[in-house]
Image (spheres, rainbow, N blue to C red):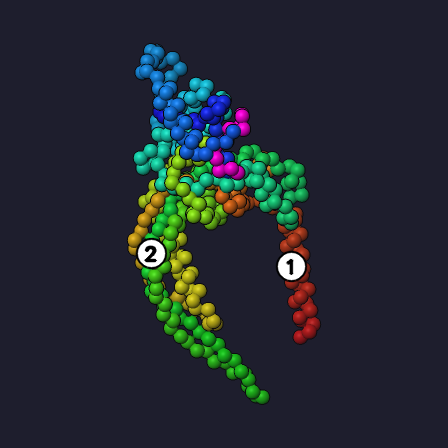
Protein backbone atom coordinates (compact mmCIF):
# COMPACT_ATOMS: atom_id res chain seq x y z
CA UNK A 1 0.00 0.00 0.00
CA UNK A 2 1.39 3.40 -1.02
CA UNK A 3 2.37 5.87 1.69
CA UNK A 4 3.77 9.33 0.91
CA UNK A 5 5.81 11.44 3.31
CA UNK A 6 7.08 14.91 2.37
CA UNK A 7 10.66 15.48 3.60
CA UNK A 8 12.85 18.57 3.86
CA UNK A 9 15.42 18.76 1.01
CA UNK A 10 17.90 20.37 3.45
CA UNK A 11 17.84 18.15 6.53
CA UNK A 12 15.53 15.25 5.65
CA UNK A 13 13.06 15.95 8.45
CA UNK A 14 9.31 15.76 7.73
CA UNK A 15 7.53 18.74 6.14
CA UNK A 16 4.06 19.92 7.13
CA UNK A 17 1.76 22.41 5.44
CA UNK A 18 1.74 25.76 7.28
CA UNK A 19 -1.58 27.62 7.31
CA UNK A 20 0.31 30.83 8.11
CA UNK A 21 2.80 30.86 5.21
CA UNK A 22 0.77 28.62 2.86
CA UNK A 23 4.03 26.73 2.22
CA UNK A 24 5.59 23.46 3.37
CA UNK A 25 7.49 24.10 6.62
CA UNK A 26 10.29 22.11 8.24
CA UNK A 27 9.98 22.07 12.03
CA UNK A 28 13.58 20.88 12.37
CA UNK A 29 15.67 23.39 10.40
CA UNK A 30 13.00 26.03 9.87
CA UNK A 31 13.26 26.17 6.08
CA UNK A 32 10.15 26.78 3.99
CA UNK A 33 9.37 25.44 0.51
CA UNK A 34 6.55 26.11 -1.89
CA UNK A 35 4.12 23.28 -2.54
CA UNK A 36 5.31 22.40 -6.04
CA UNK A 37 8.99 22.31 -5.06
CA UNK A 38 8.26 19.97 -2.13
CA UNK A 39 6.16 17.75 -4.36
CA UNK A 40 8.85 17.51 -7.06
CA UNK A 41 11.57 16.72 -4.49
CA UNK A 42 9.44 13.99 -2.91
CA UNK A 43 8.60 12.39 -6.25
CA UNK A 44 12.28 12.44 -7.28
CA UNK A 45 13.34 10.90 -3.94
CA UNK A 46 10.80 8.11 -4.29
CA UNK A 47 12.14 7.25 -7.74
CA UNK A 48 15.74 7.21 -6.45
CA UNK A 49 14.88 5.07 -3.43
CA UNK A 50 12.92 2.38 -5.28
CA UNK A 51 13.92 -1.04 -3.91
CA UNK A 52 13.84 -4.51 -5.44
CA UNK A 53 11.01 -6.92 -4.87
CA UNK A 54 13.05 -8.96 -2.39
CA UNK A 55 11.01 -10.03 0.64
CA UNK A 56 11.66 -12.12 3.75
CA UNK A 57 9.75 -15.35 3.85
CA UNK A 58 6.72 -14.92 6.08
CA UNK A 59 5.99 -17.84 8.37
CA UNK A 60 2.79 -16.25 9.58
CA UNK A 61 4.00 -15.30 13.07
CA UNK A 62 2.06 -12.36 14.39
CA UNK A 63 0.37 -11.66 11.07
CA UNK A 64 -3.12 -12.98 11.51
CA UNK A 65 -5.71 -11.59 9.16
CA UNK A 66 -8.09 -8.93 10.44
CA UNK A 67 -11.42 -10.58 11.03
CA UNK A 68 -13.31 -7.42 10.14
CA UNK A 69 -12.12 -7.37 6.56
CA UNK A 70 -11.98 -3.98 4.89
CA UNK A 71 -12.51 -2.01 8.11
CA UNK A 72 -8.84 -1.59 9.16
CA UNK A 73 -5.65 -1.61 7.10
CA UNK A 74 -1.95 -1.80 7.89
CA UNK A 75 0.59 0.63 6.40
CA UNK A 76 4.33 0.88 6.95
CA UNK A 77 5.79 4.23 8.02
CA UNK A 78 8.49 5.23 5.49
CA UNK A 79 10.52 6.93 8.27
CA UNK A 80 10.73 4.39 11.08
CA UNK A 81 9.15 1.24 9.63
CA UNK A 82 6.43 1.16 12.25
CA UNK A 83 3.00 -0.20 11.41
CA UNK A 84 0.23 2.37 10.97
CA UNK A 85 -3.30 1.09 11.52
CA UNK A 86 -5.91 3.14 9.67
CA UNK A 87 -9.62 2.70 9.20
CA UNK A 88 -11.14 2.43 5.77
CA UNK A 89 -11.77 6.17 5.42
CA UNK A 90 -8.49 7.70 6.65
CA UNK A 91 -6.49 9.40 3.89
CA UNK A 92 -3.88 11.29 5.94
CA UNK A 93 -2.62 10.61 9.46
CA UNK A 94 0.52 10.50 11.61
CA UNK A 95 2.75 7.58 12.61
CA UNK A 96 2.01 6.62 16.25
CA UNK A 97 5.69 5.75 16.81
CA UNK A 98 7.71 8.61 15.32
CA UNK A 99 4.91 11.14 14.77
CA UNK A 100 5.79 11.78 11.14
CA UNK A 101 2.99 12.86 8.80
CA UNK A 102 1.88 10.24 6.28
CA UNK A 103 -0.50 10.38 3.33
CA UNK A 104 -2.19 7.15 2.26
CA UNK A 105 -2.14 7.63 -1.50
CA UNK A 106 -4.34 4.64 -2.36
CA UNK A 107 -7.20 6.36 -0.51
CA UNK A 108 -6.98 9.31 -2.88
CA UNK A 109 -7.06 7.62 -6.27
CA UNK A 110 -9.77 7.06 -8.84
CA UNK A 111 -13.24 8.01 -7.61
CA UNK A 112 -11.72 8.95 -4.24
CA UNK A 113 -9.42 11.61 -5.68
CA UNK A 114 -10.89 15.03 -4.79
CA UNK A 115 -11.42 17.65 -7.47
CA UNK A 116 -10.83 20.61 -5.17
CA UNK A 117 -9.30 21.54 -1.84
CA UNK A 118 -9.36 24.66 0.35
CA UNK A 119 -6.12 24.91 2.37
CA UNK A 120 -6.10 25.66 6.09
CA UNK A 121 -5.67 29.39 6.79
CA UNK A 122 -6.00 29.38 10.60
CA UNK A 123 -3.93 27.25 12.95
CA UNK A 124 -4.56 25.24 16.10
CA UNK A 125 -3.45 28.09 18.36
CA UNK A 126 -6.27 30.23 17.05
CA UNK A 127 -8.68 27.30 17.43
CA UNK A 128 -7.87 27.22 21.16
CA UNK A 129 -8.29 31.00 21.45
CA UNK A 130 -11.62 30.90 19.60
CA UNK A 131 -12.81 28.18 21.98
CA UNK A 132 -11.97 30.40 24.96
CA UNK A 133 -13.74 33.36 23.34
CA UNK A 134 -16.73 31.15 22.54
CA UNK A 135 -17.52 30.35 26.17
CA UNK A 136 -16.42 33.71 27.65
CA UNK A 137 -19.31 35.71 29.11
CA UNK A 138 -21.91 32.94 28.79
CA UNK A 139 -24.28 33.61 31.71
CA UNK A 140 -25.73 30.09 31.93
CA UNK A 141 -22.33 28.36 31.88
CA UNK A 142 -21.39 26.50 35.10
CA UNK A 143 -19.09 28.64 37.30
CA UNK A 144 -16.34 26.04 37.36
CA UNK A 145 -16.34 25.31 33.62
CA UNK A 146 -13.28 27.47 32.90
CA UNK A 147 -11.24 25.77 35.67
CA UNK A 148 -12.58 22.24 35.27
CA UNK A 149 -12.82 21.84 31.49
CA UNK A 150 -9.90 20.12 29.83
CA UNK A 151 -9.09 20.23 26.13
CA UNK A 152 -8.69 16.59 25.18
CA UNK A 153 -7.42 17.27 21.66
CA UNK A 154 -7.42 19.85 18.89
CA UNK A 155 -7.38 18.21 15.47
CA UNK A 156 -7.14 19.72 12.01
CA UNK A 157 -9.13 17.58 9.57
CA UNK A 158 -9.78 17.84 5.86
CA UNK A 159 -13.42 16.78 5.73
CA UNK A 160 -14.90 15.34 2.50
CA UNK A 161 -17.72 17.39 0.96
CA UNK A 162 -19.80 17.17 -2.18
CA UNK A 163 -20.29 20.51 -3.93
CA UNK A 164 -23.48 20.75 -5.98
CA UNK A 165 -24.14 23.20 -8.84
CA UNK A 166 -27.54 23.60 -10.48
CA UNK A 167 -30.15 26.01 -11.82
CA UNK A 168 -33.60 26.17 -10.27
CA UNK A 169 -36.84 27.36 -11.87
CA UNK A 170 -39.73 28.33 -9.61
CA UNK A 171 -43.42 29.12 -10.06
CA UNK A 172 -44.96 30.48 -6.87
CA UNK A 173 -48.47 31.52 -5.86
CA UNK A 174 -49.21 33.17 -2.53
CA UNK A 175 -52.40 34.29 -0.79
CA UNK A 176 -51.72 37.69 0.75
CA UNK A 177 -53.70 40.27 2.70
CA UNK A 178 -53.46 43.97 3.50
CA UNK A 179 -55.37 45.39 6.47
CA UNK A 180 -56.58 48.99 6.76
CA UNK A 181 -58.15 50.51 9.88
CA UNK A 182 -59.79 53.89 10.54
CA UNK A 183 -62.40 55.37 12.81
CA UNK A 184 -64.90 58.19 13.16
CA UNK A 185 -66.67 59.57 16.22
CA UNK A 186 -68.88 56.50 16.53
CA UNK A 187 -67.11 53.49 15.06
CA UNK A 188 -63.80 51.82 14.29
CA UNK A 189 -63.52 50.25 10.85
CA UNK A 190 -61.33 47.46 9.48
CA UNK A 191 -60.98 46.50 5.83
CA UNK A 192 -59.01 43.47 4.67
CA UNK A 193 -58.00 43.23 1.02
CA UNK A 194 -57.06 39.83 -0.42
CA UNK A 195 -54.52 39.26 -3.18
CA UNK A 196 -53.17 36.37 -5.22
CA UNK A 197 -49.45 36.98 -5.75
CA UNK A 198 -47.66 35.31 -8.67
CA UNK A 199 -43.89 34.90 -8.80
CA UNK A 200 -41.82 33.11 -11.43
CA UNK A 201 -38.11 33.06 -12.18
CA UNK A 202 -34.76 31.30 -12.26
CA UNK A 203 -31.87 31.06 -9.83
CA UNK A 204 -28.37 29.61 -10.14
CA UNK A 205 -26.53 27.84 -7.33
CA UNK A 206 -22.82 27.05 -7.20
CA UNK A 207 -20.95 24.82 -4.78
CA UNK A 208 -23.73 24.00 -2.34
CA UNK A 209 -21.86 21.85 0.21
CA UNK A 210 -23.04 18.55 1.67
CA UNK A 211 -20.87 16.72 4.20
CA UNK A 212 -19.68 13.36 2.84
CA UNK A 213 -18.47 11.88 6.15
CA UNK A 214 -20.57 9.88 8.56
CA UNK A 215 -18.11 10.78 11.37
CA UNK A 216 -18.94 14.49 11.31
CA UNK A 217 -22.09 16.09 12.73
CA UNK A 218 -23.97 17.52 9.73
CA UNK A 219 -25.47 20.35 11.79
CA UNK A 220 -21.97 21.45 12.85
CA UNK A 221 -20.63 21.25 9.31
CA UNK A 222 -23.45 23.46 8.03
CA UNK A 223 -23.15 25.86 10.98
CA UNK A 224 -19.49 26.70 10.23
CA UNK A 225 -20.33 27.76 6.68
CA UNK A 226 -19.74 29.68 4.51
CA UNK A 227 -16.43 28.87 2.86
CA UNK A 228 -14.84 31.21 0.31
CA UNK A 229 -14.65 28.99 -2.75
CA UNK A 230 -12.66 31.62 -4.63
CA UNK A 231 -9.70 30.25 -2.65
CA UNK A 232 -10.35 26.64 -3.69
CA UNK A 233 -7.50 25.04 -5.65
CA UNK A 234 -7.06 21.86 -7.66
CA UNK A 235 -6.35 18.95 -5.36
CA UNK A 236 -2.73 18.53 -4.29
CA UNK A 237 -1.88 15.92 -1.64
CA UNK A 238 0.96 18.05 -0.24
CA UNK A 239 -1.57 20.28 1.52
CA UNK A 240 -2.68 17.30 3.63
CA UNK A 241 0.72 16.94 5.31
CA UNK A 242 0.43 17.78 9.00
CA UNK A 243 -3.33 17.26 9.13
CA UNK A 244 -5.76 14.38 9.20
CA UNK A 245 -7.92 13.70 6.16
CA UNK A 246 -10.81 11.36 5.44
CA UNK A 247 -12.19 10.10 2.16
CA UNK A 248 -15.94 10.13 1.74
CA UNK A 249 -18.11 7.31 3.07
CA UNK A 250 -21.36 8.96 1.94
CA UNK A 251 -21.37 9.06 -1.86
CA UNK A 252 -22.75 11.77 -4.11
CA UNK A 253 -25.99 9.88 -4.81
CA UNK A 254 -26.75 9.51 -1.10
CA UNK A 255 -25.99 13.24 -0.61
CA UNK A 256 -28.42 14.42 -3.31
CA UNK A 257 -31.55 14.58 -1.07
CA UNK A 258 -29.85 17.02 1.32
CA UNK A 259 -28.53 19.11 -1.58
CA UNK A 260 -32.01 19.22 -3.14
CA UNK A 261 -33.50 20.24 0.20
CA UNK A 262 -31.01 23.06 0.73
CA UNK A 263 -31.42 24.41 -2.82
CA UNK A 264 -35.21 24.19 -2.70
CA UNK A 265 -35.38 25.91 0.71
CA UNK A 266 -33.10 28.71 -0.51
CA UNK A 267 -35.20 29.16 -3.66
CA UNK A 268 -38.46 29.33 -1.70
CA UNK A 269 -36.95 31.76 0.80
CA UNK A 270 -35.66 34.04 -1.96
CA UNK A 271 -39.03 34.21 -3.70
CA UNK A 272 -40.91 34.71 -0.42
CA UNK A 273 -38.66 37.70 0.34
CA UNK A 274 -40.18 39.50 -2.69
CA UNK A 275 -43.61 39.61 -0.99
CA UNK A 276 -42.75 42.13 1.75
CA UNK A 277 -45.30 44.80 2.62
CA UNK A 278 -48.34 42.57 3.18
CA UNK A 279 -49.99 41.83 6.51
CA UNK A 280 -49.90 38.10 5.82
CA UNK A 281 -48.52 35.89 3.07
CA UNK A 282 -49.37 32.19 2.80
CA UNK A 283 -47.97 29.91 0.05
CA UNK A 284 -50.84 28.62 -2.08
CA UNK A 285 -49.28 26.64 -4.91
CA UNK A 286 -45.53 26.36 -5.33
CA UNK A 287 -43.26 24.38 -7.65
CA UNK A 288 -39.45 24.26 -7.86
CA UNK A 289 -37.62 22.39 -10.61
CA UNK A 290 -33.88 21.68 -10.96
CA UNK A 291 -31.77 21.46 -14.09
CA UNK A 292 -28.12 21.46 -15.25
CA UNK A 293 -26.92 19.68 -12.12
CA UNK A 294 -23.21 19.07 -11.54
CA UNK A 295 -21.32 17.73 -8.53
CA UNK A 296 -17.67 17.93 -7.47
CA UNK A 297 -15.72 16.28 -4.69
CA UNK A 298 -13.74 18.54 -2.33
CA UNK A 299 -11.81 18.48 0.94
CA UNK A 300 -12.56 21.41 3.26
CA UNK A 301 -10.56 22.42 6.38
CA UNK A 302 -12.13 21.94 9.82
CA UNK A 303 -10.64 22.22 13.31
CA UNK A 304 -12.28 19.90 15.83
CA UNK A 305 -11.88 20.71 19.54
CA UNK A 306 -12.75 17.91 21.96
CA UNK A 307 -13.09 18.81 25.65
CA UNK A 308 -14.02 16.97 28.83
CA UNK A 309 -16.10 18.50 31.64
CA UNK A 310 -17.25 16.44 34.62
CA UNK A 311 -16.59 13.24 32.72
CA UNK A 312 -18.65 14.21 29.66
CA UNK A 313 -17.19 14.87 26.21
CA UNK A 314 -18.08 18.06 24.33
CA UNK A 315 -17.19 18.60 20.67
CA UNK A 316 -16.71 21.98 18.97
CA UNK A 317 -15.90 22.76 15.35
CA UNK A 318 -14.19 25.69 13.65
CA UNK A 319 -14.00 26.60 9.98
CA UNK A 320 -10.30 26.16 9.12
CA UNK A 321 -10.46 28.95 6.54
CA UNK A 322 -12.54 31.67 8.22
CA UNK A 323 -12.31 30.85 11.94
CA UNK A 324 -16.09 30.61 12.47
CA UNK A 325 -16.64 28.59 15.66
CA UNK A 326 -19.66 26.51 16.77
CA UNK A 327 -20.46 24.06 19.54
CA UNK A 328 -22.77 23.17 22.41
CA UNK A 329 -21.81 24.22 25.95
CA UNK A 330 -23.04 22.74 29.25
CA UNK A 331 -25.76 24.69 31.10
CA UNK A 332 -25.87 25.23 34.86
CA UNK A 333 -29.32 24.16 36.09
CA UNK A 334 -29.09 26.54 39.03
CA UNK A 335 -28.22 29.51 36.84
CA UNK A 336 -30.89 28.53 34.32
CA UNK A 337 -33.68 28.46 36.90
CA UNK A 338 -32.43 31.68 38.49
CA UNK A 339 -32.52 33.34 35.07
CA UNK A 340 -35.95 31.87 34.25
CA UNK A 341 -37.31 32.95 37.66
CA UNK A 342 -36.09 36.48 37.10
CA UNK A 343 -37.64 36.53 33.65
CA UNK A 344 -41.04 35.33 34.89
CA UNK A 345 -40.89 37.78 37.80
CA UNK A 346 -40.27 40.60 35.35
CA UNK A 347 -43.19 39.53 33.17
CA UNK A 348 -45.43 39.30 36.25
CA UNK A 349 -44.43 42.81 37.34
CA UNK A 350 -45.26 44.23 33.90
CA UNK A 351 -48.64 42.48 33.82
CA UNK A 352 -49.38 43.75 37.33
CA UNK A 353 -48.63 47.33 36.28
CA UNK A 354 -50.85 46.98 33.22
CA UNK A 355 -53.68 45.63 35.40
CA UNK A 356 -53.45 48.61 37.78
CA UNK A 357 -53.52 51.03 34.86
CA UNK A 358 -56.65 49.38 33.50
Q: Neighbour class for label 2 at 10 Å: few (<14), some, many (≥20)?
A: some
Q: Is residue 351 left or right of residue 156?
A: right
Which one is in front, 305 or 189?
A: 305
How many C-alpha atoms fall within 10 Å of the one at disc 1: few (<14), some, or many (≥20)? few
Q: Is residue 293 left or right of residue 82?
A: left
From this view, report whether residue 285 is shown above or below residue 308: below
Q: Is residue 346 above or below residue 179?
A: above
Q: Is residue 87 visible?
A: no
Looking at the rendering, which quadrant does residue 311 occupy?
A: top right
Q: Please report the bounds of the magenta region as a residue range.
A: 20-30
Q: Which mark is residue 344?
A: 1
Left or right: 131 in relation to 200: right
Q: Is residue 230 magenta?
A: no
Residue 243: x, y in percent?
47, 33
- Viewer-proximal residue among 327 and 129: 129
Report the residue that reaches farthest toward the left: 292
Residue 194 location, quadrant: bottom left
Q: Quadrant of the N terminus?
A: top left
| Residue beneath disc 2 | 167
Q: Is residue 149 left or right of residue 39?
A: right
Q: Which quarter of the image is occupied by the C terminus?
A: bottom right
Amino acid sequence: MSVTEYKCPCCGAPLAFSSGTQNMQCASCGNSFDIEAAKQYTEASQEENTTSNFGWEDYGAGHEEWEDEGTMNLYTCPSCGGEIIADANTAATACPYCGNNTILQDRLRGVFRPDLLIPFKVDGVRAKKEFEKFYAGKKLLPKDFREQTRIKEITGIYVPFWLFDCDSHANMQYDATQVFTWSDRDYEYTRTDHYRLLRSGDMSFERVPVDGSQKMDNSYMEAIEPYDYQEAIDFNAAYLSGYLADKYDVDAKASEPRANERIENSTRSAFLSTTAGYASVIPHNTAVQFQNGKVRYALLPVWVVNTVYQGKNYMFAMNGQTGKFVGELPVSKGRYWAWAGGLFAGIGLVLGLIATLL
